[in-house]
């Protein structure tokens, strides 16, 4: 009798921690020490694999994607994101490589906003403005790893972070949970849920820099980009939205039919000049989640294709304009100008200061939700 209980116990334990057969072993989530923070806290790297040979490595510092291995049209698997080899790189990073940013992704004018008549003042970390949650935003936090599991359809990791009332000037204790999943269809999905105990604002996003050539020595200028959008929220100096909408028609901002990123990136056009290239929010025509493909990127040499799906109303397309050859990344590669691009699904920048933009307000009892999927394929 006790033997039976013992065997049943072993089977149960093995299935809970997915530690059995060789087939399943291929998909196991591998965990290893990535580094230690100054205070001695350990940061771990989790490797999620799928049956197609793709894999993503994620660390619990900043809930950061540190590498993403995807096949090209000949099946060659290469890393398609920028990042660092060591934890020190991420601790000192100012480019937000691969991380979850927040509480508010993108800029808030002068770091000020009002909720119920009260004015809040956020950390100013981008000239006179607030950017990506401040100096100690979600990208600089040590996240709790709630679970890391594999199933027949891929692997996933769930991480959470409790951002304390007053952190970087934001009201309310906010708990954000992020689930990264890599499935067998080469889709990396990111699911966010957030709650608060006081009215606040929440607008996290993901900040991977992609380079689909698989070689970050190449620029991203030959990638072809389609964004399903007819309007941007134009910016003034400091990349702060004016609060207006402007049509992309007949402008260098028109990606609705697909165009080489480099085609008009240096155009003599006010928005391009203000952004030092592309660094704007596109107003998405559709944003119903998995039914809504909002962007497609195609890299002709490798044949890699990246499709983005989201339920967010906007997407910041940033063409790596601030990469200037001063940052040394993975394998000692120095990241030159425009060698990575970001597609950051989110609410519009500075929405708390524009009543005509979708609201980023979160109430106690409500749950913030976001689903964004980066799907990889070849052509
Ligand atoms: C975002 C911003 C850019 C820049 C990068 C990080 O994409 O819109 O202006 O700050 O992050 O360098």
Image (spheres, rainbow, N blue to C red):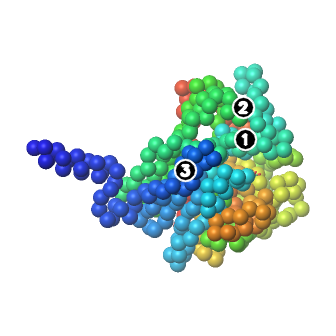
Left/right placement of residue 4 relative to residue 26 reads left
Local SS, label 1 = loop
Task: Please identify the quadrant where the N terminus is shown.
Answer: top left
The nearer-to-camera label among 1 and 3 is 3
Q: Evaluate whether residue 32 shows in this view.
A: yes
The nearer-to-camera label among 2 and 3 is 3
Circles 1 and 2 in contact, beta carbons < 8 Å: yes
Task: Please identify the quadrant where the C terminus is shown.
Answer: bottom right
Q: Position of residue 363 (x, y in %)?
A: 60, 27
- How many angstroms separate mark 1 from mark 2 (CA)? 9 Å
Query: At 70% from the left edge and 72% from the top edge, which residue is drawn?
Result: 217
Query: At 54% from the left edge and 26% from the top edge, which residue is drawn?
Result: 365
Q: Evaluate whether residue 187 shows in this view.
A: no
Q: Position of residue 307 (x, y in %)?
A: 58, 60
Q: Residues within 10 Å of mark 1 (few under 14, many from 20)?
A: many
- How many angstroms separate mark 2 from mark 3 (CA)? 26 Å
Q: Position of residue 108 (x, y in %)?
A: 77, 39
**Residue of label 2:** 169
Local SS, label 2 = helix
In the image, residue 238 sits, relative to residue 86, either above or below, namely: above
Report the front residue among 366 and 209: 209
Query: At 76% from the left edge and 37% from the top edge, which residue is drawn?
Result: 123
Q: Earlier in the sequence, mark 2 or mark 3?
A: 3
**Label 1, ligand 1: CB separation under 8 Å:** no
Specify the farthest residue to the top. Answer: 117
Q: Earlier in the sequence, mark 1 or mark 2?
A: 1
Specify the farthest residue to the left. Answer: 1
**Residue of label 1:** 134
Could you say which disc has been placed on residue 43 in the image?
3
């Amino acid at each position: 009798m006790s033997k039976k209980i013992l065997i049943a116990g072993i089977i149960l334990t093995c299935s809970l921690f997915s530690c059995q057969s060789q087939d399943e072993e291929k998909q196991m989530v591998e965990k290893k020490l990535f580094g230690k923070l100054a205070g001695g806290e350990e940061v771990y790297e989790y490797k999620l694999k799928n049956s197609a040979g793709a894999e993503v490595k994620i660390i619990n510092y900043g809930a950061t994607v540190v590498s993403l291995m995807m096949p090209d049209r000949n099946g060659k698997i290469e890393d398609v994101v920028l990042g660092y080899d060591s934890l020190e790189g991420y601790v000192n990073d100012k480019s937000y490589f691969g991380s979850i940013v927040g509480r508010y992704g993108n800029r808030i004018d002068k770091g000020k906003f009002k909720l119920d008549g009260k004015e809040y003042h956020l950390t100013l970390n981008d000239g006179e403005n607030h950017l990506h949650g401040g100096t100690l935003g979600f990208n600089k936090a040590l996240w709790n790893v709630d679970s890391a599991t594999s199933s027949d359809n891929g692997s996933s990791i769930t991480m959470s972070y409790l951002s304390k009332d007053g952190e970087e000037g934001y009201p309310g204790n906010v708990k954000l949970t992020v689930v990264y999943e890599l499935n067998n269809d080469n889709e990396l999905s990111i699911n966010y849920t957030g709650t608060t105990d006081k009215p606040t604002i929440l607008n996290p996003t993901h900040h991977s820099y992609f380079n689909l050539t698989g070689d970050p020595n190449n620029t991203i200028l030959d990638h072809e980009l389609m964004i399903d959008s007819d309007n941007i929220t134009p910016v003034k100096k400091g990349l702060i939205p004016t609060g207006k909408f402007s049509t992309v028609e007949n402008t260098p901002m028109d990606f609705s039919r697909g165009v080489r990123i480099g085609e008009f990136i240096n155009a003599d056009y006010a928005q391009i000049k203000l952004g030092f290239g592309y660094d704007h929010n596109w107003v998405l025509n559709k944003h119903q989640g998995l039914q809504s493909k909002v962007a497609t990127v195609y890299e002709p040499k490798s044949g890699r294709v990246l499709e983005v799906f989201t339920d967010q109303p906007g997407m910041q397309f940033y063409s790596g304009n601030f990469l200037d050859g001063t940052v040394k990344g993975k394998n000692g590669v120095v990241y030159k100008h425009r060698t990575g691009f970001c597609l950051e699904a989110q609410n519009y920048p500075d929405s708390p200061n524009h009543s005509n933009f979708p609201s980023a307000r979160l109430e106690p009892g409500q749950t913030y939700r976001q689903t964004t999927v980066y799907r990889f394929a070849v052509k």
